[in-house]
Image (spheres, rainbow, N blue to C red):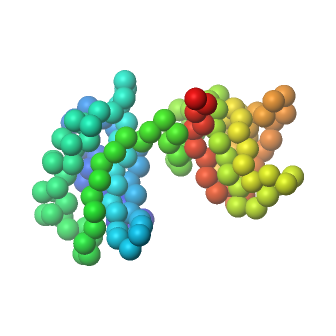
């Protein structure tokens, strides 16, 4: 799966950049019996539906020609969103000090979900400041880290 997302990311990166956006993530997943290829984009000031449409229209012929996925799939381009998932070291660096939601595979102290300020990132390990306490989580414990927005 990762080879497909890497190949599509390499194809999409220049197009997304030319459109004034940045490529946040590429996802290739199966949902409700269908395969979905999704590009998540970001832009200073926010992503518009027009940004998504322009990139989608430009990527269609590129994907058809490169044919990185032999089976049929649904192609979508969307915003990374306010509650975007943090995956790469640079994602964590960019949002250091921001409020995040961290989900664990197994409960720790009876909880699988922690919300706090992103305090540190070290080779996959994440530290959160929760209240006055700083809690460190090992990479192997962490199922997901995403930005947390309080409405």
What is the total number of numbered labels drawn onto the structure image?
0
Location of residue 4 in the rendering, given as x and y in whole percent from the top left corner: 34, 65
Location of residue 138 in the rendering, given as x and y in whole percent from the top left corner: 74, 53
Q: Residue at x 28, y 67 (%)?
A: 73
Q: Quadrant of the N terminus?
A: bottom left
Q: Residue at x 36, y 29 (%)?
A: 46
Judge from the rendering whether residue 61 lies leftward or rightward of residue 19; answer left or right.
Answer: left
Q: Residue at x 34, y 55 (%)?
A: 38
Q: Quadrant of residue 93?
A: top right
Judge from the rendering whether residue 51 lies leftward or rightward of residue 92; answer left or right.
Answer: left
Q: Residue at x 71, y 55 (%)?
A: 104
Residue at far right of view: 109
Location of residue 151 in the rendering, given as x and y in whole percent from the top left corner: 58, 29
Which sits in the foreground, 77 or 33? 33
Judge from the rendering whether residue 21 lies leftward or rightward of residue 125; answer left or right.
Answer: left
Which sits in the foreground, 49 or 58? 49
Location of residue 5 in the rendering, given as x and y in whole percent from the top left corner: 37, 60
């Amino acid at each position: 799966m990762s080879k497909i997302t890497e190949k599509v990311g390499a194809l999409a990166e220049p197009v997304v950049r030319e459109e004034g956006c940045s490529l946040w993530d590429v996802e290739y997943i199966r949902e409700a019996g269908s395969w979905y290829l999704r590009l998540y984009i970001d832009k200073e000031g926010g992503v518009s539906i027009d940004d998504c449409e322009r990139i989608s229209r430009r990527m269609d012929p590129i994907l058809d020609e490169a044919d990185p996925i032999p089976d049929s799939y649904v192609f979508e381009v969307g915003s990374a969103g306010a509650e975007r998932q943090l995956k790469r070291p640079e994602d964590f660096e960019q949002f250091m000090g921001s409020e995040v939601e961290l989900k664990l595979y197994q409960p720790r102290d009876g909880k699988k979900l922690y919300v706090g300020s992103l305090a540190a990132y070290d080779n996959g390990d994440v530290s959160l400041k929760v209240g006055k306490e700083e809690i460190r989580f090992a990479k192997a414990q962490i199922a997901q880290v995403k930005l947390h927005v309080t409405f």
